[in-house]
Amino acid sequence: MAKIIIPTPLRKFTDNLSSFETNGTTVQEAIEQLTQTHTGLERHLLDDNRNIRSFIRVYLGEEDINSLEKGATAVAPNAVISIVPAIAGGI
Amino acid sequence: MNTSLTPAEMARYARHIAIPEFGLQGQEKLKAGRVLVIGSGGLGSPVLLYLAAAGVGHIGIVDFDTVDDSNLQRQVLFTTDDIGKSKAEKAKERLLALNPHLDIVVYKTRFTRENALDLVKDYDVVADGTDNFPTRYLVNDACVLAGKVNVYASIFQFEGQVSVFNYPLADGSRGPNYRDMFPEPPPPGLVPNCAEGGVLGVLPGIIGSMQASEVIKVLTGVGEPLVGRLFLFDAASFMTRILKVQKSPDTKITELINYEQFCGLESPSELRPVKEITVQELYDWQVQGADFQLIDVREPHEYAVANLEGELIPLGTVSAAAHRILKDKKVVVHCRSGVRSAKAIRELEDLFGFENLYNLKGGILAWAKEVDASVPAV
C-alpha cells in the first residue's frame, strides 16, 4: 500500500491520523480515497473541478507532482505521497 | 569598509576560523554581512542569537511588538523582566551583551507594503520570522523586487519548514521563491496561527537554528544553501523530508500589492463594525443579574484552561449551532482577544439575521487584566 502523509494543519480532518494507506494507482485516485474516508478534507484539498488546490502541494517522494503528470502520476505500492500546505507561524 | 578582524575578534571566532572551508575569509564575510531579521519572536530569537554569536557584522531587527508572558515559552531572547518592553530594543541589548563587535539597528515598526522596500534595501539577506500569510507574501515579494535572498522558515504546532528563496544562481537568474512554492495562500481560517493553534516551544529553536545556519551559508558561500528545496520537520514523529521546489513560469512579481486582500483578509478598517461591550460592562451585567446569554467561540482546549462559564461554540461550528443562540435576549460573544468573536458575529448576522449579538471587547485577555486577575490570560 502507498502512504499519504497528512500535515499537522489538516489532521483535524483525519481524526489526528498522521498518515493514510491507499491502493490508488494514481495520485488523483489516492487523494480521492483519502477524501472519501475523511470527507472533511475534501473542500480543503480539491476544488470544484476536483483538481488539487493551489495552496496545497502534493509530492510523490521528493518530486512535486506538477513536475510529473499531476493527478495522473502513477503511484507505486510502496510510494510515499506528501501533502504540503503553507504554514505561516513564526513568533 | 574594514572587514579585517581585530585580535579580540580572532580569539572570539577561533572555532569558525579553524574550519578549513570557512577560515578567516568566511569570518570576514560574516563581519561584512548585512542581515535583516523580520520578527524577533520564536524564530527570530534563535536566528538573532546565533547570527550575533557568529559575528554577522550588521543586523537589522524589525519588530513593533512588546514582550508578553506567553512569549517566554519559546522566545529565548527575552526574560521575565522584559515583559511589556519593546522586543526589538530588548533584543538589541541582549545581542550586544553577547557580542559587542556588532552594528545592530532596530526598526520598531510593522513590516508593511509602504516601508518594505526601504527596509530591505540596505541588507544582503532577509530572514523571515513573521507569523502570518500577508506578511510572508510581502517579505517574499519585497525580496524578489529588491534582489535580496529570503531565508524562509515557518512553524506550526510540531511542524517546521525551511528554504532559501530568490538565491542568485550561476546563470544570473534567481532560484525559486515562496510564490513558486505556494502561488496562493490558504483561505482564512484553514491554517491557524501559533497563537490559536499552538506551537511546541522548542520547535522554533530547532527550525530557527537551521534558518540561522542557512543565513551563514548564504553570507559566506560555504556549503550548499537550501535553494530549490524545502526542508520539512515533524517533531512529533521526528520525520524529516527534503522536497524539490521548482520555478514556475506563472510566477510574476512586478509590484507590491494589497496582501491582506490577496490573503482574503480585509483590513480592520474595512470590516463592518459589530456592537461591542467592555469587560467592565459585562461584569456590571453579571452583578446586576441581567438576563443575557454568554457564548465562547474559542476551542475546547482553550476553554479547559480558562473560561467565563459561557456556552462553548467554537468559531468553526457557529453556523451549525446557530439554533442554540438566543434571539430574544442580549447575547455576548467572546473569544481570546475579540477577533474570532467579531468574525462569529458577522457570520451569524449575515446568515441568520441576528441583531442582538455583542462582542466582548478585548476578550478573555481583557477580562483577566481588568476584572479578574485570577483568570489565566491565555
Image (tube, coloured by chain):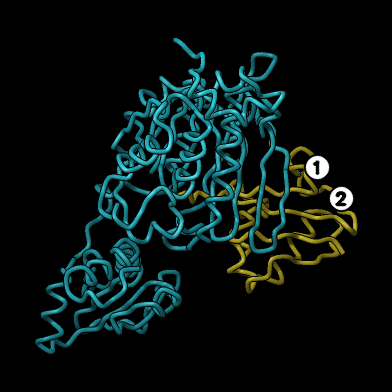
Chain colours: A yellow, B cyan
Secondary structure found at label 2: loop
| In the displayed structure image, the side of residue B252 where residue A5 appears, left or right | right
**Is the N terminus of chain A in the top left, top right, bottom left or bottom right quadrant?**
bottom right
The chain holding disc 2 is A
In the figure, B144 relative to B79: above or below? above
Q: Is residue B254 visible?
A: no
* Dot 1 amino acid type: Glu
Q: Which chain contains the residue that carries disc 1? A: A
Task: Look at label 2 and name its amino acid.
Answer: Ala
Between B158 and A88, the one lying in front of the other is B158
| Callout 1 touching callout 2 (CB < 8 Å) | yes
Q: Which residue is mark 1?
A: A69
Observer-nearest of A48 and B139: B139
Residue A79 vertical placement versus B378 (above, below):
above
Question: Eyeballing the image, is B5 above or below B285?
Answer: above
Looking at the image, the residue that sits furthest to the top is B1
- Residue at 69%, 14% (x, y): give it: B171
On the image, the x and y values in percent for residue B329 come to 19, 83
Residue A39 percent location from the top left of the image: 64, 70
Query: What residue sits right under mark 2 in the picture?
Result: A74
Answer left or right for A43 relative to B34.
Answer: right
- Residue that extends furthest to the right in the rendered view of this protein: A77
Name the residue at 51% across, 13% down: B4
Report crowding for label 2: few under 14, some 14 to 19, many 20 or more residues within 10 A (C-alpha): some
Q: Is residue B336 left or right of residue A60?
A: left
Tell me the crowding category of disc 1: few under 14, some 14 to 19, or many 20 or more residues within 10 angstroms, Cα based: few
